[in-house]
């Protein structure tokens, strides 16, 4: 079973974590199943950027991002070339190393006031 290596995040996962990831599971679902409570304001519908992760190793094993995900990622804080939305990126047979960015932009909550 592939592993998901989560780099330390001061609030969500201070020590980092090495998690088993069932093939086909989204990065977000693996994190949530292991009590790493990354924000997911749009309930996994690819309508915000709160589950933004940076794939430090193994990104080539992921299916390419679809246009809707790419459009959302353009709005993410701290966007990098290897950024993905955790709700859309599905684990295959390769281990991944991910970093959870320090900040998120919560369109679902913040945008509701406009």
Image: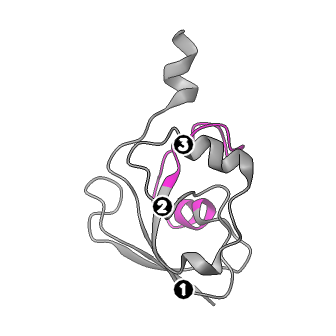
- Residue 35 drawn above or below residue 3: above
Residue highlighted by disc 1 = 95
Task: Report the residue at 68% width, 60% height from top.
Answer: 65
Question: Which segment did they paint magenta?
Answer: 28-52
Packing grade of label 2 (10 A; few <14, some 14-19, many >=20) is: few
Viewer-proximal residue among 113 and 62:
62
> Could you give the CA–CA distance between mark 3 and mark 2, rounded to whole angstroms?
11 Å
Q: Position of residue 83 (x, y in %)?
A: 50, 59
Task: Report the residue at 71% width, 71% height from top.
Answer: 63
Q: Is residue 72 magenta?
A: no
Tell me which label, 1 or 2, sits earlier in the chain.
2
Packing grade of label 3 (10 A; few <14, some 14-19, many >=20) is: few
State the image quarter where residue 103 is shown. Answer: top left
Q: Main secondary structure of the magenta part?
A: loop
Quick one: SS at disc 3?
Answer: loop
Q: Is residue 40 magenta?
A: yes
Tell me which label, 1 or 3, sits earlier in the chain.
3
Q: As drawn, is 23 to the left or to the right of 77?
A: right
Q: Position of residue 2 (x, y in %)?
A: 59, 87
Task: Report the residue at 52% width, 24% height from top.
Answer: 109
Quick one: SS at disc 2?
Answer: loop
Q: Position of residue 78 (x, y in %)?
A: 38, 48
Residue highlighted by disc 2 = 81
């Amino acid at each position: 079973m592939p592993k998901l290596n989560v780099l330390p995040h001061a609030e969500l996962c201070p020590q980092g974590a090495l998690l088993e990831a069932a093939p086909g599971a989204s990065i977000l679902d693996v994190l949530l199943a292991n009590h790493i409570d990354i924000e997911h304001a749009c309930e996994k519908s690819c309508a915000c950027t709160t589950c933004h992760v940076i794939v430090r190793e193994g990104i080539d094993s992921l299916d390419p991002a679809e246009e809707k995900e790419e459009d959302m990622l353009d709005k993410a804080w701290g966007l990098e070339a290897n950024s993905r939305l955790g709700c859309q990126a599905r684990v295959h047979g390769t281990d991944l190393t991910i970093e959870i960015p320090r900040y998120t932009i919560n369109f679902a909550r913040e945008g509701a006031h406009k």
